[in-house]
């Protein structure tokens, strides 16, 4: 059965920054560039060397979404929907599809948080 695209979970503390802004990479960044940005920021903001825990968590959360091609695609769709609400008026994706995607991403985020 087709479950639809994966959903992006709601952030615990909504940030005005996109995940791309958090990592300092463009929307079309290659996976290796995203990974490099994550590692550089993680080293800089790690709590063990005086960094902020919340900042480190935000960086890790951004990377968890952007490193997964399916979640990244879903996240990009969600960003586009927020920027252009009429985009989905053509019924390519229904609101239920988007809600399903959010639920899946929330589950992924919860798995990641449990593993951390």
Image (cartoon, rainbow, N blue to C red):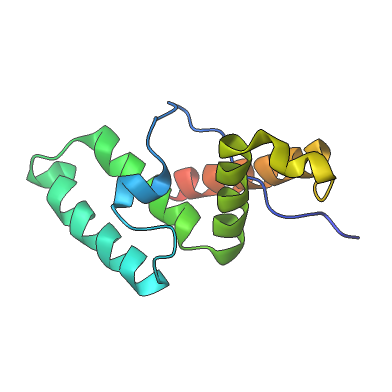
Give the image location of residue 77, x and y in percent.
Answer: 62, 50
Furthest toward the top, the residue is 13
The percent coordinates of residue 31 (x first, y second) are: 41, 70
Residue at point 75% right, 42% down? 88
As drawn, 4 above or below 54: below
41 sits to left or right of 10: left
In the displayed structure, would residue 69 be above or below residue 5?
A: below
Residue 5 versus residue 84 in the image, above or below: below
Quarter of the picture containing the N terminus is bottom right
Question: Residue at 49% across / 49% down in the picture?
Answer: 112
Q: Is residue 116 visible?
A: no
x 55%, y 43%: residue:
79
Left or right: 22 in relation to 66: left
- Res. 14 image quadrant: top left
Residue 51 lies, in percent from the top left, at 14, 40
On the rendered structure, is 97 left or right of 64? right
Asked if one can make out residue 113 in the rendered structure from this viewpoint, the answer is yes
Residue in front for this viewpoint, 95 or 45: 95
Which one is nearer the viewer's eye here, 109 or 5?
Answer: 5
Res. 15 image quadrant: top left
Residue 17 % position (x, y): 37, 36
Residue occupying the far right of the picture: 1
């Amino acid at each position: 059965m087709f479950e639809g695209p994966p959903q992006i979970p709601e952030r615990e503390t909504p940030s005005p920054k996109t995940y791309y802004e958090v990592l300092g990479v463009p929307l079309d960044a290659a996976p290796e560039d995203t990974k490099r940005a994550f590692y550089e920021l993680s080293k800089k903001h790690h709590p063990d060397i005086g960094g902020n825990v919340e900042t480190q968590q935000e960086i890790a959360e951004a990377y968890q979404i952007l490193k997964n091609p399916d979640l990244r695609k879903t996240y990009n769709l969600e960003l586009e929907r927020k920027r252009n609400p009429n985009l989905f008026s053509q019924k390519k994706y229904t609101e239920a599809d988007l809600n399903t995607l959010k639920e899946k991403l929330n589950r992924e985020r919860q798995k990641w948080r449990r593993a951390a």
